[in-house]
């Protein structure tokens, strides 16, 4: 349970970090909060030759609020965003999701962008980003690009991140007045990864339901505004369009059943909050 | 730009329990191993080495964190506190430690240093912490022999005592 050896680079600027990443090629890896990477190093599920520590880069430590969104830099820890003064007003969905993300002790170190990069199919932050229709800013030595969250997650712990590229920031659309948000999760114990997590947004155009823990990536579905007796049919269609996984924690059938129940509760709560 | 070669040991300076220290470590050394094997502070325990049990919890810049999920290199320049910092002197327990003793908050003591460091951080940051806050912090810790009821009791008693102390001093 000890990591294999690696070079460790502590760049002073973002440009240096990007150069180091480009030079290291497939052997290089960013280390942010280390809350997912260090367990993988300890178990030797990951054996990078070069680690690049981005946590000292001032340029990545920003939480910026603009007209319609919140931009969270790659060195912002989960606990920092959780404690930011306008979270409940600007990102009520995240305010509801944070208590479910690991523990106080892991949120104190883990970053928001690190969770997005790690792309665990059960993770709450990727789910929230996809459900809100957020985006990811990627940067390499040569280019910058921005992709929608929905395009960023492509499979089980697989993303659109190319070799030599890192996440510079993620963008969450800011809460709009007259919009309701809700988050629900079922896990074995407090702090465990979700078996199923649901996030919902209700506005004058209709409903959005995000689902994590079921398919190999967070999935989001748009629905028209529904009457109480229409939820079950709508959810049943969604459930069968998901490729539900079966693993040691739960059967695919149990996951589908959770989506039916949790999905309905989450959609109803978001609709109520809107009213 | 500092680049630390894998084959060598590198100096790491940081503040440990209020004192500046300098230690040497390979890049792959975990903070938990640096504390225990290089510096000799064995109060920080190691259970799972993947972040789940909480035995290795220390404070980094005032926040409770897993020493087993922190590379020693990552604490360069940081302020680290371990369980050894709690008691004011070897013959006297801190109020939190004393409450654990009084309320039977430990048996074998394996999980205790980590739990103390989480609760100490909580009570410093939020002197008004109640049962729910305490349970939330404890959810990041596994205790396999005492059971959590007396641990919660001890923490509530320590919080209460701390609040009384503050009103008397005010
Ligand atoms: C006990 C425990 C319980 C947990 N429970 C949960 C949970 O319930 N829900 C949940 O979502 N997570 C959970 N986690 C994981 C935690 O949220 C991590 O913080 C998060 O997944 C990774 O963030 P990090 O900053 O620690 O990234 P790291 O561990 O440093 O990195 C993770 C991966 O992302 C890459 N990476 C990091 N930052 C960037 C970047 N800017 N650009 C490109 N690549 C990058 C790294 O190279 C690595 O591959 C848990 C962890 C532990 C130890
Ligand atoms: S040893 Fe670090 S959490 Fe278990
Ligand atoms: S006191 Fe023995 S594990 Fe907690």
Image (cartoon, coloured by chain):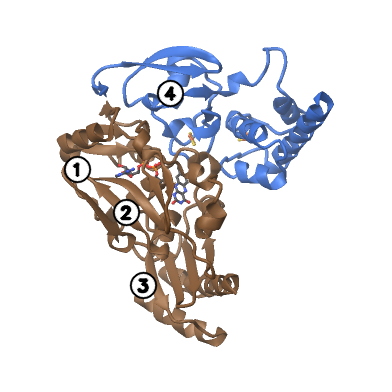
Q: Which residue is mark 4?
A: B33
User: Is ligand 1 within 8 Å of the beta carbon of the residue shown at mark 2?
Assistant: no
Image location of residue A274, percent across then percent down: 57, 72
Chain rendered brown: A
Query: Would you identify the image quadrant in which residue B69 lies?
Result: top left
Q: Earlier in the sequence, mark 2 or mark 3?
A: 2
Contact? badges 2 and 4 (CB < 8 Å)? no
Q: Quarter for ligand 3?
A: top right
Q: Nearer the viewer, mark 1 or mark 2?
A: 2
Residue A68 in the figure: left or right of residue A177: left
Query: Would you identify the image quadrant in which residue A127 lies?
Result: bottom left
Q: Earlier in the sequence, mark 3 or mark 1?
A: 1
Pointer 2 chain: A
The secondary element bearing badge 1 is classed as: loop
Residues behind callouts 1 and 4 on a single chain: no
Residue B154 in the figure: left or right of residue A135: right
Pointer 4 chain: B
Q: B122 and A156: which one is in front?
A: B122
Kindly tell me whether residue B151 is visible in this rendering. Answer: yes
Q: A262 and A138: which one is in front?
A: A138
Q: Which residue is mark 1?
A: A164
Q: Which residue is mark 3?
A: A242
Q: CA distance from mark 3 to mark 1?
A: 32 Å
Kindly tell me whether residue A122 is visible in this rendering. Answer: no
Q: Would you call the spot at circle 1 few (<14 residues within 10 Å), some (14-19), or many (20 or more)?
A: many
Q: CA distance from mark 2 to mark 3?
A: 24 Å
Q: Colour of chain B?
A: blue
Q: Which residue is mark 2?
A: A136
């Amino acid at each position: 349970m000890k990591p294999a050896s690696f070079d460790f680079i502590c760049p002073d600027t973002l440009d240096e970090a990007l150069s180091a990443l480009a030079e290291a090629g497939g052997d290089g890896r960013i280390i942010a909060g280390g809350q997912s990477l260090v367990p993988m190093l300890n178990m030797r599920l990951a054996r990078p030759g070069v680690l690049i520590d981005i946590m000292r880069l001032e340029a990545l430590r920003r939480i910026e609020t603009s007209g319609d969104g919140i931009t969270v830099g790659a060195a912002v820890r989960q606990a920092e965003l959780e404690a930011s003064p306008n979270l409940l007003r600007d990102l009520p969905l995240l305010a509801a999701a944070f208590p479910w993300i690991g523990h106080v002790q892991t949120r104190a170190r883990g970053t928001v962008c690190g969770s997005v990069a790690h792309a665990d199919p059960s993770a709450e932050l990727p789910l929230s980003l996809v459900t809100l229709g957020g985006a990811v800013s990627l940067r390499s030595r040569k280019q910058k690009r921005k992709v929608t969250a929905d395009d960023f997650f492509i499979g089980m712990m697989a993303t659109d991140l190319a070799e030599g590229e890192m996440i510079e920031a993620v963008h969450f659309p800011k809460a709009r007045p007259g919009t309701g948000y809700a988050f629900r999760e079922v896990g074995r114990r407090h702090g465990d990864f979700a078996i199923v997590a649901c996030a919902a947004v209700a506005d004058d155009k209709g409903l959005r339901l995000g689902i994590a823990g079921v398919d190999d990536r967070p999935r989001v579905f748009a629905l028209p505004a529904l009457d109480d007796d229409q939820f079950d049919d709508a959810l049943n269609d969604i459930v069968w369009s998901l490729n539900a996984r079966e693993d040691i924690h739960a059967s695919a059938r149990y996951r589908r059943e959770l989506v039916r129940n949790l999905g309905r509760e989450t959609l109803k709560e978001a609709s109520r909050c809107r009213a | 730009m500092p680049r630390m070669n894998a084959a060598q040991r590198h100096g790491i300076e940081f503040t440990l329990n209020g004192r500046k220290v300098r230690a040497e470590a390979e890049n792959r050394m975990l903070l938990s191993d640096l504390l225990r094997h290089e510096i000799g502070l064995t109060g920080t325990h190691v259970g799972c080495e993947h972040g789940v049990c909480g035995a290795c919890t220390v404070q980094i810049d005032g926040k409770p964190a897993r020493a087993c999920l922190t590379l020693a290199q990552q604490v360069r320049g940081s302020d680290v506190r371990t369980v050894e910092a709690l008691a004011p002197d070897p013959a006297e327990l801190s109020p939190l430690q004393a409450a654990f003793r009084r309320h039977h908050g430990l048996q074998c003591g394996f999980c205790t240093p980590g739990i103390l460091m989480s609760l100490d951080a909580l009570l410093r940051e939020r002197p008004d912490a109640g049962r729910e806050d305490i349970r939330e912090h404890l959810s990041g810790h596994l205790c396999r022999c005492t059971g959590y009821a007396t641990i919660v009791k001890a923490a509530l008693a320590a919080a209460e005592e701390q609040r009384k102390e503050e009103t008397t001093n005010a």
